[in-house]
Every structure is written in structure tokens, then in C-alpha cells.
Amino acid sequence: MNEALQKTLTLLLLIGLGLLLRSKFKNKEYVNGIKQIVLTVALPATIFIALLKIEVDAKMIFVPIAALAFNFIMFALMPIMLKSIGIKKHSSTGRTLTMLVPSLAPGLSCFPFIAEFLGEQGLALAALADVGNKFFVLIFLYIIAMNMFLSNNKSEESNLGKKVKSLLLSLVSEPINMVLFLALVLLGLGINYTALPAFIQGIFDKTSATMTPLVLIFIGLAVQLKEGKKRLVISVLFTRAGLTLLFSAFLIAVFGITDTNLILLAVVLPLSSASFWPFAHISVFNLQEEAKEIPEDSRTFDTKLAVLVLAFSLPFSTILILGILTAGNYFTDISTLLFTGIAMTAVGVLPRLYSKIILPSLSKTINADA
């Protein structure tokens, strides 16, 4: 059996194990506990090891800048995307999608697969890329959420500086960012992984080994198919993925990337699921509106839609990323990326365009003629 296929089957079986264990993890706190272990212990250890094993290069500053550029480009495209699927920009639905779609959560949806298929070098670069994404989701999107909230509630005032300071402290104290900073300091001092004491290496090695199985079991436990605006969410996710692939093709072509692993990294990292942080920002302002007993249809954001996007985004991204990495060199060709990107965008946009814009227009025309 093909090695990549064997690896994929192993990963899928671990997700399947998570699905089988759902009856044992009915309490959400148990599932969240697994996620916290991954994000605060296993993933930081894996990233620390990966960073200390790579060769420092000044060109690496390009990596977080490229990720941040992706975030801002997707954010800038949101008005066009919303219009194409028949969603008003200033509606609660439009504001919610504007917050979630440009964000990335590579920790749970992408890093484990990068580690398995692209190795430690790929994972280290992915961790650096996430630094740019973290700035976007923690700082920029909070400011955007506040502006949306204030526009929808003209009488509200808020201490923006205090909130941003709190978020900066949160950013600094996050375990992943702490080990990222520590690893970069050690590299700057010329200390690599092999220079660390054996018992320190042993702690990190054994902790890191738990990451992939824990993440995949978590995905199986967390997958939800709730009722609601499922068609809208699926349409948005297909459109997001299509535009992402077009961005990756453009990036690869402009910078002349030829290394297979770097190409695959540039393709799969932006396909990561939507981040939880925008949802956290949304929840903060929703609680303020709930306390004032503002009706749900008049609130700034649609929290139910936000939950649905997160619930669908994780398995959707996982399937895409796993499929692309399993296919090997197939998705390293720019023409393949362009064709797939256009096709996925069309799958996302055309059904909504027809049902929300074209069909109502035809109905009006027919009724007018009658």
C-alpha cells in the first residue's frame, strides 16, 4: 500500500476513534479539556522542537507577513463575497461572516497534518506564519468587532485602549507564543535542540508525541451537524476555500516557489479552519446586548451562525488539507490550483446566486408580465 495512503488511513482511523468515543464524552467540559491539553501542552512542545531543529534565516520574516497578507486580502474581499451569495454586508449575518471567514485556526485543523506529511521544517514555518495570523485575529478583528458593535449601538462607549492592552497580554501569555519566543531567543544565542540536556529533550519528545492522536480524537469528538443555516455555511466554506487556493497559486507564481514542501505548505496552511478568537470577540459584545435585552434579530452578530461556521469549518478544512497532502505532487501544479480554486468558488457562489438573486428576479419579471 502507498505510504501516504497508509498514513492517511491511520489519521482517519484516529478521527473515527473520536467518533466512537462521543458517547463517553457527553459533557462539553471533557472535550474542551482535550483541546486545552493540545493547545497548552502538546502543540507548544511540538512547535518548540520543530523551531529548535531548523536553520535560522532572515528570509523567514516573510512567512508571518505572507500569512497576515492572506488575512487582510480575505477581509478586503468579504463585501464582494457576501454580495455574490446574497448576504447584506451590514446585517448580523454579514458582520458575523466578515469576522470569521478571514481568520485561521491552524493549531487543530492543519498543524498535525503538516507535522506528519511535511516534517518539522514545515511545522516550524507554519508556526511562524501563525504569528501574523494571531495579530490579525486577536487585535485587528477585535477592533473591527468593536466598530461594528458601536455602529449598531450608537449610544455605547467603550475603552478601546484598555481592551486592546488586555488582548496584547493574552497574546503574550499564550503557551504557543511563549515557546515560540523562547525558541527564537535560544536560536539567537546559537542553542539548538541537540544542545539541550537529555532529560529536557525527553520531556518535549514525549509530550510532543501526544499531539497528533489527541487532535484527531478531538476532531472526531467535536464534529457537529447542527440544524440551521447549513446551506449558507457550506456555500461560504466552499467560496472561502476556492479563493484561498487562488491566493496560494498567486503567491507561488509571484515568488517562484519551487520546493514541493513549501508549495504544499503555502496551499494547505491558508485552508485552516476558521478561528475561535473572532467568536470570542462576538460573544463579548453579544453578552452586552443580551444584558440590555436587545432582540436577537437586532443584535450586531448572529452567535448561532458563528457556532455553526466553527462546527462545519473544522471537519471541512480537515478533509481538504488531508486530501491535498495525501495527493502529493498533484496540487503543486499552479494550473491545478487555479482550476480547483475556480471550481470551488463556483460551487460556493452559483447556487446561492441563483436562489437569492437570479430566481427572485425571474419571479418578479414573470409576475409583472402576468
Image (cartoon, rainbow, N blue to C red):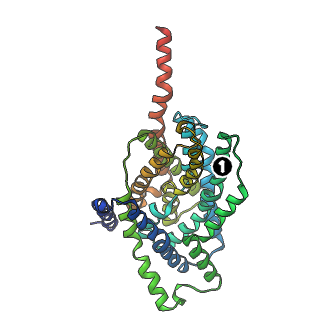
Residue 31 vs 85, above or below: the answer is below
Asked whether 339 or 122 is in front, the reply is: 122
Residue 333 vs 233, above or below: the answer is below
Around disc 1, counting alpha carbons within 10 Å, would you say few (fewer than 14), some (14 to 19), or many (20 or more)?
A: many
Task: Name the outermost residue toward the top.
Answer: 370
**Which quadrant is the N terminus positioned in?**
bottom left
The image quarter containing residue 230 is: top left
Residue 192 image point, x, y percent: 56, 85
Task: Name the outermost residue toward the front.
Answer: 292
Provide the residue designation for mark 1.
146
Residue 175 image point, x, y percent: 55, 72
Query: Which structural element holds mark 1?
Result: helix
Left or right: 31 with respect to 150?
left
The image quarter containing residue 295 is: top right
Residue 255 in sight in this render: no
Residue 174 vs 355, above or below: the answer is below
Q: Give me the residue at 47% from left, 86% from top.
A: 201
Count of marks overlaid on the render: 1
Residue 28 in sight in this render: yes
Left or right: 203 with respect to 162?
left
Q: Which amino acid does label 1 sit on?
A: Met
Left or right: 325 with respect to 13?
right
Residue 302 image point, x, y percent: 52, 43
Residue 232 image point, x, y percent: 45, 39
